[in-house]
Amino acid sequence: MNALEEQLHYPLGDALPEQGRCIEVAPGIKWIRMALPFALNHINLWLLRDTLEGENGPIDGWSVVDCCISRDESKAQWEAIFANELEGLPILRVIATHMHPDHIGLAHWLCQRWNVALWISATDYQVARMACLGDNGFGGERSAAYFAQHGLTDPESVAQIRARTNYFPGLVPSMPESYCRLMDGKLLHIGGRSWRCISGYGHAPEHIALYCDELQVLIGGDMMLPRISTNVSVYEQEPEANALRLFLDSIDKFADLPEHTLTLPAHGKPFTGLHTRIGQLHDHHRDRLAEVMQACTAAPCSARDIIPVMFKRELDLHQMTFAMGEAVAHLHLLWFEGQLQRRLGGDGVYRFSRVA
Ligand SMILES: [Zn+2]
């Protein structure tokens, strides 16, 4: 546990759900933890006891929140959950907090398997459907050009990014052909309780967290993680985005929730200490912004120049593209707030320097 985590509280201690099993974390809310083959090696998914109005009256069952990536191991884990944890009831709907592959990869499979609908924000639904077709912003020609413009120009990286055209479809082979729309402020009735959708920006196009006041439980998705900071990046599809400002403004929306709210994060363990965590995330980004400002005061910097300032460890190419996105996000916040200026060099690379 790092020093910041010690300021939070994990009510379940070190308990983790075994593969194919759940832990009930609040009445009618079960925690599933599935393995991921990445540096971030797991994702938390949730089963919510639910009742939906069917064609011949109410049907008891479960709503699923988030899905895991598409691969056989994930499907096998789901089958074990279906066998062990549904108490003989069906899945009634699939809710996705956002369109990243670990959250939405198996949405299509789950919806088909149970003949149910996907609930998601309109923006994330549309972006995911486009990304399935390979037009995704995670690799390919435009992506390589974007990173090169921010200083990632070494031929090996450029070639690898150019070649990585199948990243999203490889993890999310298809999407349901229709969906039910989630949007900020909408109330979902799940298992006789009301859950409010809270939109968040800067991490995904339109992330939806869910809050139940009766239980004082927040399903935070990737917007409120206890241990790692959420990836906040600018990518080539929206190259002039101010993603970090959007993210910081979005997490402040959770400040209205009670301090002892139980937050269910997509990665890490359920925790309380929401207000403390919001403060820690602001501090984290304030420190990174100060480092970036200092570097750009000493000399004009590209995003690539900022990487060793912000990230003190070796990065593989995949981590490097995330890091580049984060570096641009920090530079952009300072640029949009008038503290940095941006100039395009004769070499085609953007560099940022302190406004005199
Ligand atoms: Zn995400």
Image (spheres, rainbow, N blue to C red):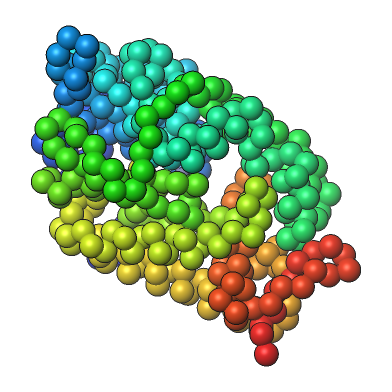
Instruction: Please identify the residue farthest to the bottom as the structure is shown.
Output: 356
Instruction: Please identify the residue farthest to the front as the structure is shown.
Output: 55
Indicate left or right for 245 with 264 as reference: right
Q: Which residue is nearer to you in this view: 100 or 6?
A: 100
Indicate left or right for 208 with 29 as reference: right
Name the image quarter holding residue 282. bottom left
Which residue sits at x=38%, y=19%? 110
Q: Which residue is nearer to you in this view: 41 or 226?
A: 226
Which residue sits at x=48%, y=51%? 203
Instruction: Please identify the residue farthest to the top as the structure is shown.
Output: 56
Indicate left or right for 19 with 217 as reference: right
Residue 211 at x, y percent in the picture: 23, 47
Quarter placement of the C terminus: bottom right
Residue 354 at x, y percent in the picture: 66, 83
Which residue sits at x=66%, y=30%? 134
Which residue sits at x=46%, y=69%? 285
Q: Is residue 30 above or below residue 277?
A: above
Residue 312 at x, y percent in the picture: 57, 64
Name the image quarter holding residue 82. top left
Q: Is residue 142 above or below residue 249?
A: above
Q: Which residue is nearer to you in this view: 8 or 175?
A: 175
